[in-house]
Amino acid sequence: MDDWIDYYDSTHTIYASKLHRDLHFELIARDIIGYIGSPDAVVLDYACGEALSAAKVADACGMLYLAEPAPGVRGRLIARFAPNTKIRVRSLEDLRKMAEHSIDLVVMNSVTQYMTAEELDSAFATIRRLLKPGGRLVVGDVLRPEVGMAKDVIALLRFAASHGFLRDALIGLVSTALSDYRQLRSRVGLQRYGEAEMIKKLAASGFSASRVAVNIGHNPWRMTFVGRPALTV
């Protein structure tokens, strides 16, 4: 994951335009809000990225923790949300020090592809410790083995066409093909999981999980899973 952390901590061009970036985070925030069960809920966004619309999520819950591994991104989050008393920024290491059973909802969106299988197991173990017995883990935007990059391109172009940045998206696709992202993706690769494989992986970490019908974000060919701490005998 370190290579990807360094990439996202750099000045990258993953978004086609400012409009694309803003819409991306607004859509994710909307989808996260849909999983918040109570206005008093304590929510953790695991490896949240820039989280530009986090204030909207915070408005819908009692407390929002933004956990981010990239130090530069984390610094921007701290500066951006310092006035908001309902948002707290943490490193992934900080999560290990938080009280167990203190979180109602954990969202890990578009993260699994950047982690090794072992790193993901470790993250699930940390999350399992933090979740309340009735809490939920939402793992979104999981890449499937049988779905290639062409579907990602189609999903982006559909999203762009419906929101008025198609020209920027087309230019952005050319830029991405020549970018450090494409080179890093080719060199390091992305982790992909089948539906049964992810459910089994979550079960091994103590979650009873299932896939939900609609993925978080704009890409319908990726998967979202909801897990609850499994009952122990």
Image (spheres, helix red, strand yellow):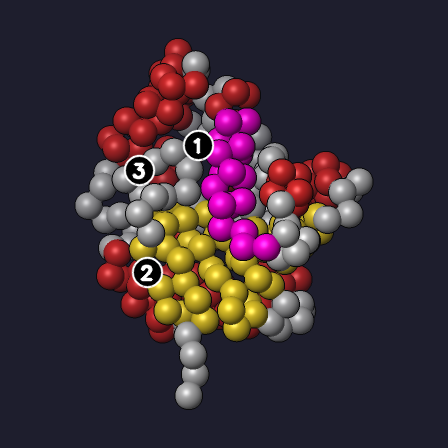
Amino acid found under the numbered disc labelled 2? Ser
> How far from the left and from the top, in percent, is residue 12?
52, 30
- Could you tell me which secondary element the residue under label 3 belongs to? loop
Asked whether 229 or 169 is in front, the reply is 229
- Could you tell me which secondary element the residue under label 2 belongs to? strand
Q: Residue at x 54, y 55 (%)?
A: 37
Residue 13 visible somewhere in the drawing: no
Q: Residue at x 24, y 38 (%)?
A: 148
Q: Residue furthest right?
A: 83
Q: Which mark is residue 140?
A: none
Q: Which mark is residue 220?
A: 3
Q: Earlier in the sequence, mark 3 or mark 1?
A: 1
- Looking at the picture, does residue 138 appear above or below residue 56? below
Look at the magenta stretch and give its main secondary structure. Answer: helix
Crowd rating for badge 2 (residues with CA inside 10 Å; few <14, some 14–19, many 20+): some
Assess whether mark 1 and mark 2 are in contact (beta carbons under 8 angstroms): no
Residue for badge 2: 210
Q: Earlier in the sequence, mark 2 or mark 3?
A: 2
Amino acid found under the numbered disc labelled 3? Pro
> How far from the left and from the top, in percent, is residue 63?
68, 53
- Residue 46 is one of the magenta-drawn residues: no
Q: Which mark is residue 180?
A: 1
Q: Earlier in the sequence, mark 2 or mark 1?
A: 1
